[in-house]
Image: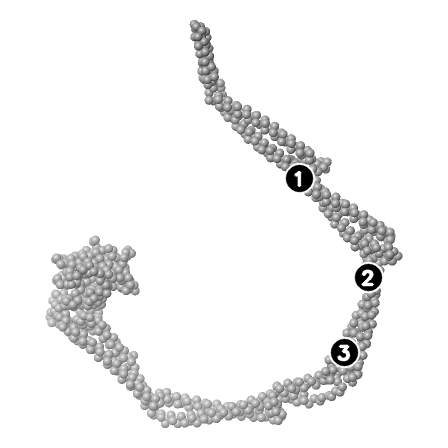
Amino acid sequence: MYLKTLTLFGFGQFHDRTFDLTPGFNVLLGPNEAGKSTITQFITAILFGFPTKKHPELRYEPLDGSQFGGSLELVKDANVYRVTRVAGARGGKVTLQNLTTDLTLPATQLPKLLAPVDLALFENVYALNELRLGTVFQASKQVVMDRLRHVGAVGSDFWLAQAQQLDKAADERYKPQGRNPQLNQQLQQHRDLTAKLEKANGAYQEYWRLLQDQETARKRQTTLQHDLAASRQRANDLAQQLQAWPIYQQWQELGQTATTATTGFTEDDVTAFERVTSQVTAAQSALKADQHRLQNLQSHTQLPKIFQEALKVTPQLTPLLAQLPTVTETEQERARLLAQQRDLEQRTTGIERQYATASGQMPRPFSLATTQQLKQLQDNLALANQKRRRLQQDLNQANEDYRRLQPTRQRRNPLADKQVGWLAAGLVTLIGAMFLPGTVFKLVGAALGIVIGYYGVFVVESQTPASRQLQVLADDIKDLQAQLREGGQRIDELTDQIDAIGTAHDLGRLPAEQWLAAQAAIGEWERLTQQLDSVHQRLTATAVTQQDFQTAVTALLPSLAHQDFREVLHQLDQLQTTQQQLATQDGELAGLTAQLKRDQTALTTAQAAQATFLQTRNVADEAEFYHQYQTIREQGNRAAQRQALATQLGAARLAQLQRTDQATLTQATQTAQATAADQQHQLDTVTTHLATLAGQLTHLTSNGTQATLRQKLANLETTMQATAQEWLLDRLTSQWIAATLAAASGDRLPKIVAQAGEFYAQLTENRYTKIELTAETLRVQRADGAWRTVGQLSRGTAEQLDLAVKLAFAVIMQPQAAMPIVIDDGLVNFDADRRQAAYRLLAKLGHHLQIILLTADSAAQTVAQGPTNRVVNLTSE
């Protein structure tokens, strides 16, 4: 298989760039930053996928923002395939086409097309650069041998990885010099348990003695705990009895108080006595209140001075007093009318001040017909004035036009001269006809002269356009002046008619424009005047009524003759009030007298009932009654208090206290508390002894008892046996995989090593002639027969060894895995002679394999000459 074409859509610095390759030796020449590493990564990415975005330095996304990706054409088994890969998930979006059959294949066919080569094998063998060639120098011997085995057995990556995992798992279980592996830790635990078991065997007798002492102490502790609980219960009960002793003493004292017997009196009688006493108290209070009212009524009775004078004329005065409310209302009405009169006078005065004439005469209001006539006349006058102003404007404009068109100096009128000429011709013809012979000729000549003269006078135009326009303007001016005169006459007529209306209604002092607006005020003035007349009439009637009433009153009561009418009304009102009070007091005095009698009777009855109640209860007075009542209450309170104390103590506690005394109870309490304290001390001693025994047993059993240690040791040995079996299984399986891979590659590995030896001799110019791969190491033989390991070689020589091995692999494995070899500046550590030797070797291998060399060394192009080779300059389009 070989690559035919590389097309970079957008990859690194390349944009829409295509490179054509040959099946042989291809040299892509360019200096640093020309894109050599970019092309190497492009081939790897298109075949095996773009790296993830976690490694942006390996993705080579385009710098100019173009489409990321590209395509390449490869030839395999006489079929041309195009692989296109652009940005997408999981390594990019892949399109695979068979250009030979013009079919589009699924993307899953690409790994099968490249098999058995995968990304790891391609990067380790076919894609070479300085870094990858240098790994042979840096790697250990085992790594070099594993890589050679990988090269010798295609597809062995999985089994090599399995072998490495098995070796790692075995190392995690056991290492001869390790400490952390599982089996190493178990061995250390086995040694520790064995030492503890030997120590436990020596302390066995002491351990059993301590166990027996511990059991005895625990029994003693249990007994003491039970006795201590009982003692504490006894001490607490006695302490509670002693604490309740003062309450018991109060209960005894209340029971020892003597009960005083009462006869003829019970506690229920208190309610009845208080009811009778309340009746007596209420009767006394009512009697005092009525007596106080009687005194107040008698002391506050005062008569005005006019009262004695009125008593003499009471029959005549009574009808007048009956009229007093009506007369009072009349006075109030008079005050209201006076206020209304003042308001009306102010309003009428304001209107008169605005519209009345100099003589004080108010204008007369318009009738409806007069109002309509005035509105019509004013409208006509407004139209006439408007028309006059318009005519005046037109007249002014016509005069202005006339002055503008009128010539400044007299000019000759050619049309007038022409008219005179025709007239003269007619006269000449007429006169000439007079001299013609014959009457007919004379008549014809005369008629012709007349016609010519008529034509000149009436037919020929004698005026110019300017003169005609002036004539028209003059006629218009005359017409406008006539219309103005007519309009002025019309305005005068309308004005006279309006003035006549104003004179007839006394509106001469007001402008005509205000006449209609003044009608509302004039109407309001007339209405107010009518109201004022009505108020005046009512005031006159009121004054007559008041005068008649006052005359009648002063005739009966001369002392009021010089008083104001309002004062007269006030005196009469007081007189009437006094008469009513006297009439009311007479009734109240009679009522109070009767009420006092009833109050006295009720008080006597209540006092008699109270005396009877006290006699029936064998008490002399109220104080003795309440003394006996207080005695009964105290007896009841003591009984209730004694019952409450008994309830507080309880029946059982009360019975206990009744069987002892305070001194005995105090002594018993102290004894019980001392017993509990002694038992607590004994319990503390036993508990301390148990703690000591537990510490000793813990110390003896810190490494475990014999049985426990033996069981732990047996379990550990079982676990160690299982771990050892797992370790042995991992080791044997790993060795079996290594042996199997060695057997699988046994037929190819010697060929690869032999071919690598030949290539290595060519690269080193026969300084090294042989490569040998032993079970322990990789070494090379010099031409003088001396052997050197990889670690003894220089960097360049070690890289030449790695190049020889990989070229040998590509040649030997070509039938199974034909892939192009891509070398990206991998020969920079070669000296000039060996670099030329490498170029010659690559050109020679180009006859069998596709070699793509990306280098900055221009010397490579001298070797790449031939029909199957090609040199591409990366810096030129």
Local secondary structure at mark 3: helix
Local secondary structure at mark 2: helix
> Is label 3 or label 1 in front?
1
- Reading the image, the residue beneath label 1 is 519
State which tag comes first along the sequence, 2 or 1. 1
State which tag comes first along the sequence, 3 or 1. 3
- Assign the N terminus to one quadrant of the image: bottom left
Query: Real-space Cα distance between discs 3 and 1?
Result: 91 Å
Q: Residue at x 61, y 28 (%)?
A: 489
Q: Residue at x 58, y 31 (%)?
A: 384
Q: Residue at x 19, y 76 (%)?
A: 738
State which tag comes first along the sequence, 3 or 2. 3
Nearer to me, 93 or 591? 591
Crowding at mark 3 (Cα within 10 Å: few <14, some 14-19, many 20+): some
> Is label 2 or label 1 in front?
1
Local secondary structure at mark 1: helix
The extreme front residue here reads: 440
Q: Amino acid at mark 3?
A: Val
Q: Amino acid at mark 2?
A: Gln
Quadrant of residue 654 within the rendered picture:
bottom right
The number of discs equals 3
Q: Amino acid at mark 1?
A: Gln
Q: Which mark is residue 581?
A: 2
- Reading the image, the residue beneath label 3 is 276
Query: Real-space Cα distance between discs 2 and 1?
Result: 62 Å
Could you tell whether 319 is left or right of 126 in the image? right
Quadrant of residue 388 within the rendered picture:
top right
Q: Is residue 552 visible?
A: yes
